[in-house]
Amino acid sequence: MNINTVIGPVERFLEDHGKRVGFLILLPLFLFLWLPIIVVAFMSFADSVLVFPPENFTLEFYHIFLDNSQAWSAIFTSLQVSLVATPIAVALAIMYSYAFSKYDFPGKGVITVLIAFPLVVPLIVVGIALTLLFGMFGGTGSYWEVVIAHVVRILPFAALIILPSFLSFDTTLEEASKDLGANSITTFRRVTLPNILPGVIAGGLLAFTMSFNEFVYTYFVRGTGMETLPVYLWGRIEHTMSPEINVISIVFLAVALLMVAVAVLITDVERIAIR
């Protein structure tokens, strides 16, 4: 059978009904991705965590959450960790991406594998390994140990986004800058960095979101009294199923949506600047 006799009708069908077919394919995918989130948001206003659809709606658990000093302390702890771990991870990702894109050196492949290692190894394995490593040096689950663990977790994601910005950067701009008398630091600050900045910001936003939501590494590495929001949420789930859990889940969703909004805003500003 001639393959053209099959492809021809398929092409005509897609030309006539392609939009409808695409919609029918994307709609279930959209529902699969967003329906659980919509249900959680819906249930955050319910008076019971296990009854769906809820019989009554209330803002009581939002008030309980707002008055919960332990939850707010966990939020601030998450912010303190994320706001420190993210710049460190981004700085390391920039240095790695710069070196990877410009130079050939011994161990280049090994370093790349080590950076990507946490992406392919189960989180619990790396969490246990970090706990043992810190224990060898007398670690007590301090704030900085949690920060280091978060850097290990988010560095691969930041590097994966920042590296393409360096690889696609026109290096002749750097050469022109140096020909005009600028040194390497000035060239990087005034030529390279502005061109890769969108990638750096995107990597930073993703790294911050990953750090804020990180549970496994934190759970293994943290000491007594060190409680981030994911750890606090896990503790609440362990002891009781309260509708407040859904409210806390909305906090995670709000952080993610805020990062998306910032990314969109930065993209729009960049487009306006280009015009």
Image (cartoon, rainbow, N blue to C red):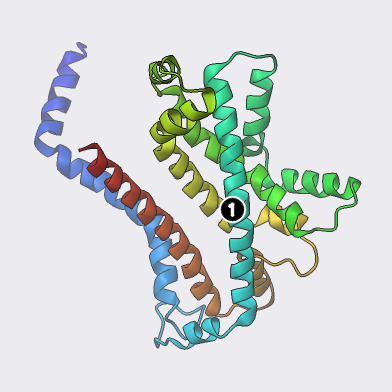
Quadrant where the C terminus is found in the figure: top left
Does residue 233 appear in the picture of this structure? Answer: no
Q: Nearer the viewer, residue 151 or 189?
A: 189
User: What residue appears at the point 83 percent right and 48 percent down from the top-left corner?
Assistant: 134
User: What residue appears at the point 68 percent right and 22 percent down from the top-left corner?
Assistant: 110
Q: Residue 273's x, y, as percent?
A: 26, 41
User: What residue appears at the point 50 percent right and 73 percent down from the top-left corner?
Assistant: 246
**Quadrant of the image occupied by residue 213:** bottom right
- Left or right of 113? Residue 251 is left
Does residue 187 appear in the picture of this structure? Answer: yes
Per the image, the residue denoted by label 1 is: 211
- Left or right of 174? Residue 14 is left
**Where is 113 relative to 77, above or below?**
above
Check disc 1: other Cα within 10 Å, few if <14, some if 14-19, many if 20+. many
Q: Residue 57's x, y, as percent?
A: 39, 86
Quadrant where the N terminus is found in the figure: top left
Q: Residue 61's x, y, as percent?
A: 50, 84
Considering the numbered disc 1 on the image, is that residue within a helix, a strand or a loop?
A: helix
**Where is 103 relative to 251, above or below?**
above
Q: How many marks?
A: 1
User: What residue appears at the point 52 percent right and 79 percent down from the top-left corner?
Assistant: 243
Q: Residue 256's x, y, as percent?
A: 45, 58
- Left or right of 114? Residue 39 is left
Q: Nearer the viewer, residue 128 or 160?
A: 160
Residue type marked 1:
Ser
Residue furthest front in the image: 181
**Where is 245 relative to 259, above or below?**
below
**Quadrant of the image occupied by residue 191:** top left
Residue furthest top in the image: 2
